Amino acid sequence: MSNFLDEYALILSSCERPSRYIGDEFLSANKDFNKANVKVAFVFPDKYEIGISNFGHKILYHIVNSHPLYMADRAYAPDKDFLDLLKKYNKPLYALESKKPLNSFNFLGFALQYEMSYTTILKMLEFSNVAVFSNERKDDDPIIFAGGPCAFNPAPMSDFIDLFLIGDGEEVLIEILDLYDKIKTKTRDEILAELSQIQGVYCPKYPKKTTKRIFIPDKKSHPVKSPISHFVSVHDRATVEIRRGCGRLCRFCQSAHTNLPVRERNADDIISLACDYVKNTGYDEYSLLSLSSNDHTNIENIIEKLNKHFSGTGVNVSLPSQRADKFSIKLAQLMQQEKKSAITIAPEAGSQRMRDVINKNLTQEQILNAVLSCVRSGWDKIKFYFIIGLPFEEDEDVLAIADLIKTINYNCKKEGLRLPSITCSISVFVPKPHTPFCWHGQNSIDEIERKKQLLLSRKPEIKNAKLNFHSPRVSQLEAFFTRADKGAGRFIYKLYKNGSYLDSWEENINFELYNDIACKLGIDFSKEAVKMLNPNDISPWDIIDCGLNKDWLINEYNKAKNAQNTIPCEQKCSNCGVCSNLKMHKIYDKSII
């Protein structure tokens, strides 16, 4: 550590927040680099405070470092000031714990969480002294792998990534490292050819239909400690994943469709993991993580048991976005025993017709009951998630967002309750691969702006509500990248070469640069974003098999046109194909606690 501080003293003293770059955090693994048979650096293409909170990274970091022969280190995207200083003093990107240059690792594993991080990955490769294009890498260069939501359409990044990990990474990653350890003396191409044969691994150099990996979450694979940031991170809390997958199958949601089938963790394991994580880390908050946390069979009993365990300690429970139809008065009371914070509910749409179109399986009465339950129990802050620009949306559906809030206010006043402070986070629909809406175009920016103003015209009627809108220009870029083919790689490369970096932060996006380069390459991403695709045509993501039957996806799209619901697979099999095609089954927690 002292040698590193001596070498980097001038850089660290000249940058903002040097604590992002020094490592040595409490509970870091700090395994011996020189003694490991295989060395992996998990690289998150966003700022330290974002990446260190990512639970997927924590799981893989834990799994690799639990293996006696392998070691995992971490790296995050430096802010621009630090990157400029590295360039000025001719220093490479390094891993936080070992302080070794990233190009000295056997594998660099990138998180593909967000389309707007693509150019950041290329810049990080450059500053690691690793060839940006995979076909230019030498035998002694690290193998670059990537996984996460964006890997389900690998085409845009296929010129730059050696291996895409499709689906759950717990087992497949160790299989990759085990095989590599046996064949690492072979040539790079030979190694890639053999690794590409592992189920769940897609290699652009040796393309083939790739079926996602499905892992049954167990206690051993779940961390009960993780590196603690030197300063506050975005999600600074202990995290326990209680459920993987979501059977609600909202038609816009990629995670629901790509993470099937539902697999619930045993209640006793959840309680044990939460207690151990808080004990080991000292956090005063723990999160029960899932795409739909209060759908867990035993959610009330779990929180009740944990409340008893943490009674009087000030340790508070946090749940992600709530399902209004499962938010009971008991659950509201259980969650506010130690500390009240905002309750988050995701109606997604204001009108019943629109909620039926997207298959939300949620009524206005259920939303109203959930909010009133919260307000009666003392919650005074409610956060809603909505989407505008959804397929088959009409102006009345947009205005229904305001009408829903007015109805909530009316009923609160009727009961003599204080009006809650409501924050509405309003995003723009982005068509995602492997969903029933993947073929439907996005609204144009002008149309989104019109709908935004339409809703804002009703703002005086809902003064207790704050409306926060996601940028339609950013959403348009997301829509282009998420459905793009391999040709988008040229666009990504040109953006990177012209300075695009950390564009996951809107203030860093140079929209003029995007437009200029797109024009030179003959790309009209505004046209591509709104394009209606033919379901019978081959899509770039068809090379990835999530287990879903294409006929089922098309049928779901047709049902959306008629505002018809599909019953959640918790209640009845929807015949999507995942369980039968991948020889899997749903797993629910049937334990009695």
Image (tube, rainbow, N blue to C red):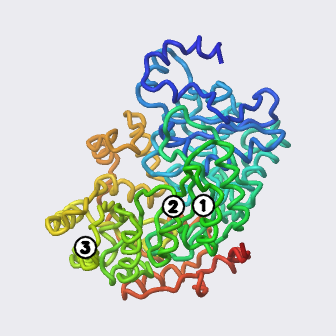
Which residue is the site of mark 2? 337
Question: CA separation, marks 2 and 3?
Answer: 25 Å
Q: Residue at x 65, y 52 (%)?
A: 203
Mark closer to the chain start, 1 or 2 = 1
Which residue is the site of mark 3? 409
Quarter placement of the N terminus: top right
Residue 260 versus residue 574 in the image, above or below: above
For disc 3, the neighbor class at 10 Å (few under 14, some 14 to 19, many from 20) is some
Does residue 569 appear anywhere in the picture? yes
Mark closer to the observer (3, 1): 1
Left or right: residue 32 compared with residue 133: right
Question: CA separation, marks 1 and 2?
Answer: 8 Å
Mark closer to the observer (2, 3): 2
Mark 1–mark 2 CB contact (< 8 Å): yes
Mark 3–mark 1 CB contact (< 8 Å): no
Question: CA separation, marks 3 and 1?
Answer: 31 Å
Q: Give amino acid for label 3.
A: Asn
Q: Position of residue 183 (x, y in %)?
A: 83, 42
Quadrant position of residue 529:
bottom left
Q: Position of residue 289 (x, y in %)?
A: 57, 60
